[in-house]
Image: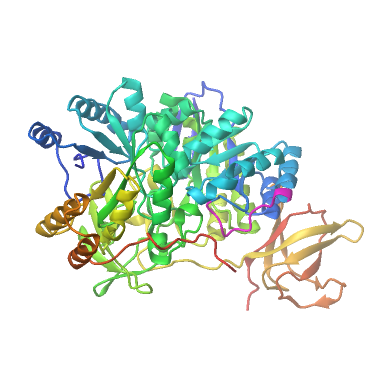
Amino acid sequence: MRVFLSLNIIHLSDGSDEMKEVELLSPAGDLERLKITLLYGADSVYVGGKKYNLRANATNFTIEELKEGCSFAHNLGKKVFFTLNIVFHDEDLEELYDYIDQIVKCGVDAFIVSDIAVIKYIKEKYKNIEVHLSTQCSVTNYQEALFYKNLGVDRIVLARELSILEIKQIIDKVGIDIEVFIHGAMCTCLSGRCSLSNYVTNRDANRGGCSQVCRFCFESGDKTFTMATKDLNTATIITKLIEIGVKSFKVEGRMRSIYYLATVIGSYRKIIDSFKNNTLTQEILAEQLKILARVSNRESSTQFLDHVADKSDQYYTGRQEISNQDYLGLIIDYDKTNKIITLKERNYFEKGDRVEIFTPSGKTYPLIIDKIYDEDMNLITVARHPEEIIKLYFEEEIEKYSMLRLIEKKMG
Amino acid sequence: MPLKDYSVEYHKYYSMEEIKKIRENTDKEIFVVMNKKFSNEEIDGVKEQVKTLNILKIKGIFYYDLAVLQIKKELNLDIDLVWNNTFMVTNYNTCNCFYDLGVKYGYLSNEITLNEILEINDNTNMDIIVMLLGYPVVAFSKRNLLTNSGFKNEIEVMEPVSGQKYNIRENEEGTVFKYNKIRNNAFCLKKLLDNNLPYIYLIEDDIEHDLFLEGLKITHELIESKISEEKYVKRMRELFGGDTGFLYRQTIYKVTK
């Protein structure tokens, strides 16, 4: 008998089953994000093109960028999933199928789809490409999952309103790959069953224009009514989801920064890998929770997964978001001869700040900022301009795409 | 008729016993609404209800959850279904796909334009249903959004920038948002009839009963050519206001930077 320990759950398993391979799935709003998040430990990414996806206002991918992204991923033995999950209107149909054919040629491994006509088209024409059912369809029971399985769907991204037990029942009864959201922003309403954005701002939520009206403040007489939800964070219960047979663990946020993605993916990678090799301890979990908390801009909870979501999962005083300035910059080069890091700066830092370098391979290096140089190696006292090239002396070789984050501002 | 415990977003629900009684006492076509997203635990109950409705020779079931279609196929039932995916019934291509899978009717989204309605009706074999009158449903949440924040189970709210008002109601199934203006599509009824649209939907929920009956009566009169379109539209506007929603207003989804 193995004993799995997480922060608030002691979980027992007979250990007889070989743990199935699981996938950590990351969003990637553009090519840079795709590369970074794969390097930081995502097994697969989901991306959108310039058309037909639910993040119409993200940067998204051109055909050329998508080809490059697929090659990059495949060279690492990883996968790219393409979102095609809007609710189509007649005017969208004219170019849709040509567009799908173009996307297939880029080398994507799967489409994420919500429309049954699109599912049928892809499955009939492309036998080797998977179709994943979007959470937009809010599948909540095994009978509906069975319908989609019979239609040829390879994987279902379940509704975010299900409990762990309900997810297990669907896995056991249907026998289809199941994907579950594990981290990020939540919708207040059932996915696909909300047109608040259409009514209040004339922006079509189901075609990628959601204006997040559920984070607005409403008036009710002399009171304020709000309905915004806290974010989802499953770090303390993800081991249970692995044990019941969830195939893929999805992080929300195609519009999130590279720092956010590197941090969140890095943390879940660490938790999943430690669990797989039986080294997960309370200390590791506590450390990762701390890291996740620092990068988040809202409070979080486990939402519906282990309780009926209640008032503790919501906010009541309007938008509750804090700007995070921990991310100091991206390391774009290391000069081995002179032991110099080249950093593309993001946020202000100065001599005396206690910082940490974290790398795609999961290493961390603490340091206190001493000498700061500009691009031409002139000594400067502070790094204050976003996108400015900064150089720092550092003894050990640092991988490209490592990042610098603030731990503590200098005293005084 | 929304079936109690198996439908959401309505104000009044009917038990199976009530539906049976009404079915026995009328020769009119009866449709039953089962538009809830079901849990695993509810599936056995859904099967029983669908089987009973099949025996009752109900004209069709409005469904949101594809579990209903799966059950119809599994049990090889004759009963017809209405694709009622609220905001997602927006193109003829998908309508035709569901038709090929054995779904006879489609209840179009209220958030599409008149031109889109006509185009869908022209290009599908499905029998299309369009809402003519009623308070449009705007959103549905599984959360208890009112009691969670200390409100009673029904309130009116205003979004201060747009000035729009919404009625929010909560019950054990969750929380539903409805626009507080009645959608009145009477302006285009003649056009829909000329386009051979087979069904229009008038939803009484929350509309004063006598007012609703008056609207129903004159709508019949227009269909039977007993009153002019001009008179009909004028009277409907007097009774229910003139909100045409998205009929002549296209939504956007890409924000220009």
Q: Going by the image, does B217 lie left or right of A247?
A: left
- For image coordinates 20% across by 57% down, the residue present is B153
- For image coordinates 44% across by 26% down, the residue present is A174
Measuring from the top left, give residue B94's x and y in whole percent: 45, 39
- Please identify the quadrant where the N terminus of chain B is shown: top left
Query: In the figure, A116 relative to A199: above or below?
Result: above
Colour mode?
rainbow
- Please identify the quadrant where the C terminus of chain B is shown: bottom right
Q: Point out the stretch of residues depicted in magenta.
A: A54-64
Q: Count the labels in the image.
A: 0
Query: In the figure, A238 relative to B56: above or below?
Result: below
Measuring from the top left, give residue A321's x and y in whole percent: 48, 66
Work out whether residue B208 can be spotted.
yes
> Per the image, is B240 magenta?
no
Work out whether residue B6 can be spotted.
no
Which quarter of the picture shows residue B75? top left
| Nearer-the-camera pick, A143 or B54 | B54
Which quarter of the picture shows residue B98? top left
Q: Going by the image, does B221 lie left or right of A401?
A: left
Measuring from the top left, give residue A62's x and y in whole percent: 69, 52
Measuring from the top left, give residue B135's x and y in whole percent: 25, 57
| Nearer-the-camera pick, A43 or B31 | B31
| Nearer-the-camera pick, A244 or B214 | B214
- For image coordinates 86% across by 76% down, the residue present is A378
User: What's the magenta bit mostly, secondary-structure-wise?
Assistant: loop
Q: Going by the image, does B225 lie left or right of B70?
A: left
| Nearer-the-camera pick, A176 or A344 | A176
Query: In the figure, B83 relative to B80: above or below?
Result: below
> Per the image, is A58 magenta?
yes
